[in-house]
Amino acid sequence: MAHENVRSGAIPGWRTAFGASAPPNYVLDAERRLVSVKFGKKVTAGDIEKYAASLRANPGFEPDFSEIVDLSEVEEIDLQAEEFIRLADEVDPFSVEAKRAFVARNSVQNHAARMHKILRTQRSFSIFRTVREAEDWIRV
């Protein structure tokens, strides 16, 4: 089902060879003012930087859009403390007023989501176990 205000796909420039991190799939729904992104098994700083750059380059994106980040399939997060800080301070394309929902099912995923919340001092930020719960919260 195509909609002129909905754009989706993998982000160009990702390595997809065996062992490399897979690009996150994302959907930007300008009508709902929502970006939904799903990360694969491994997440690196480069993955997040390319995702953020892709959003900034998208003419339909606004920094105050809501975001749902699905980490439920992530098994490895290859980020050092200084990378968490740089990503939160310099790379994150969303405003601190944006409503953000993270989907996390294990301690590694929860830790990554909590680190981002702390570093961004985000007020409208919550962590959920399912995408459905995240979508319900975003709609409120």
Image: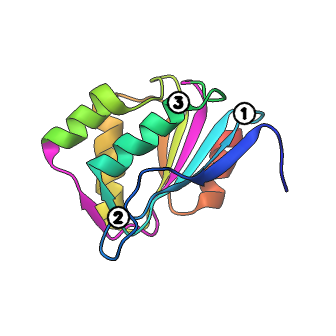
Image height of 42 relative to 137, above or below: below
Quadrant in which residue 9 is drawn: bottom right
The quadrant of the image that shows the N terminus is: bottom right
Q: Position of residue 16 (x, y in %)?
A: 40, 67
Of marks 2 and 1, which one's residue comes earlier in the chain?
A: 2
Q: Label 2 vs label 1: CA separation?
A: 28 Å
Find numbered disc 2 in the image and state the secondary structure of the residue it sits on. Answer: loop
Q: Position of residue 30 (x, y in %)?
A: 72, 33
Q: Label 3 vs label 2: CA separation?
A: 22 Å
The quadrant of the image that shows the C terminus is: top right
Residue at coordinates 21% horizontally, 52% vertically from top-left? 79
Of marks 3 and 2, which one's residue comes earlier in the chain?
A: 2
Q: Position of residue 135 (x, y in %)?
A: 66, 50
Q: Residues within 10 Å of mark 1 (few under 14, many from 20)?
A: some
For label 1, the residue is 30
For label 2, the residue is 21
Q: For this view, does 79 lie left or right of residue 126?
A: left
Give the magenta-colored segment's residue range.
Answer: 63-81
Find numbered disc 1 in the image and state the secondary structure of the residue it sits on. Answer: loop
Report the amino acid beneath label 1.
Answer: Ala
- Label ID, residue 57: 3
Looking at the picture, tell me which residue is in the foreground, 59 or 39: 59
Q: For this view, does 120 lie left or right of residue 65?
A: left
Report the amino acid beneath label 2.
Answer: Ser
